[in-house]
Image (spheres, rainbow, N blue to C red):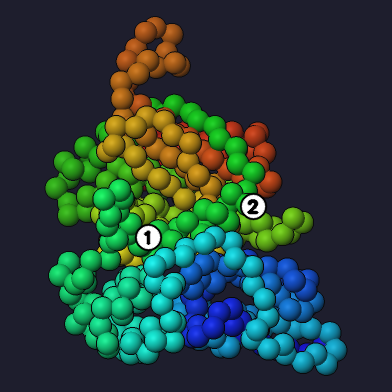
Amino acid sequence: MSTISLRIPQIGEGLQEARLVAILKQPGERVRRDEPIYQMETDKAVMDVECPYDGVIVEWLGKLDELLPIGGEVARIEVVGDVAEESVEHASVPTSDHTSSAGASDDRGRNAAIPPRTRAYAKEKGVSDNDLAKLAETSAKLMPADIDAFLAGTAPSMTTKSTEFDERSLSQKQRLLASRLVRGTQNVVQGTMSVVVNWEGIEREKERQKATGDAFQPSVFTMFAFAVAQTLKDYPDFRSTLLADDKVRTYRHVSLGIAVGLPGDELVLAVVDAADAKSWQEFAEATRRQIDLARQGQDQANESVSISLTNMQSFGLRDAIPVVVSPGVATLFIGEVYLGLDQESDTPKVRRQVNLALSFDHRLINGVGAAKFLNAVKQSVESIGAILR
């Protein structure tokens, strides 16, 4: 056995770097030659990169969302025998086309116009590669001040206009999300079910906390999220991810994802690590901290997020069919609070309630298992006072 490097391939003349946007195989997994093992993004496309060897992944050297040079090490693999490393020209297969007007320009000239410190500054500020390429067309040498001007709205427009339509570059965050969603549609067999939950206990608990006058005043959504995190202790399938058709990884603790909307209808994920192992106050503080980071544009999505929450209470929506984003196995939607009939009462009675909708990956979780989990969440929410104390 020998261990050799996997390198970022050259897939276009003049291309100098690519972004690692998805890891499809984990360390310890066996892979076959020509099997897709990660996705990379250039200015023109997101593409699957195939493994040039049969072997076992040892480690990933590249990090998600990291810009890597062509020919740079992205991973190491253990192979049988004395195998020579293949050249960086190993082929990749595009999975989604993002061709723009910048694609017609000469890549070498474009890169020469963007000094490394400007490229690093643009990445820090969240400027997409497409927008960076278009900015470079307006300047012989792009500087950090040009990035500031672009973000302030005083740079040359990144929108193409005609009498019939407008064109704009899709943001980097949306392109990364699109890549994850495409991967989900390719891998996930989705099922969805819903349940009605009595919300009055959470509202009473919020009023009780407010009456204390303490500085610690978590939101009702944070209480709901804590109830979900505590429920996950007893449901290991929802702390799991499918590594292959015949292999499941179950995490000892849950990395709870929380969808956070940004201006411009962008969407990022806040992640509370070891959410099920935290006390109530630790959980509330960590949730607030991670959501604040997400609102600053920091997307925290990673391979260990098995379940995510999406909160639409403030948008007047009662029902939805949430999307499962691979490698996660479930997404839980919470709708607006409304007055509805208490179905468990012997006499007509109106109560404040919400609808929860759970989408799950049917490859790992079947209907009965999903129903038991969803009803356990309902029970936790309705007995929130006991859980918080």
Secondary structure under the numbered disc 1 in the rendered image:
loop
Is 256 on the left or on the right of 286, as rendered? Answer: right
Q: Residue furthest right?
A: 81
Identify the image quadrant of residue 294: bottom left
Rate crowding at label 2 as few (under 14), some (14 to 19) or many (20 or more) other CA atoms within 10 Å: some
User: In the image shown, does 18 or 107 lie closer to the viewer?
Assistant: 107
User: In the image shown, does 315 or 231 lie closer to the viewer?
Assistant: 315
- For the C terminus, the quadrant is top left
* Picture coordinates of residue 105, whole percent (x, y): 41, 77
Residue marked by disc 2: 187
Amino acid type shown at disc 1 = Leu
Name the residue rendered at 45%, 16% in the picture.
344
Name the residue rendered at 33%, 87% in the picture.
113
Is 82 on the left or on the right of 145, as rendered? Answer: right
Mark 1 and mark 2: span between their CA atoms?
A: 24 Å
User: In the image shown, does 365 or 276 lie closer to the viewer?
Assistant: 365
Name the residue rendered at 47%, 56% in the picture.
178
Residue marked by disc 1: 170
Name the residue rendered at 51%, 67% in the picture.
45
Q: Is residue 47 visible?
A: yes
* Picture coordinates of residue 322, whole percent (x, y): 47, 41
**Badge 1 or badge 2: first in the primary sequence:** 1
Rate crowding at label 1 as few (under 14), some (14 to 19) or many (20 or more) other CA atoms within 10 Å: few
* Picture coordinates of residue 257, whole percent (x, y): 44, 55
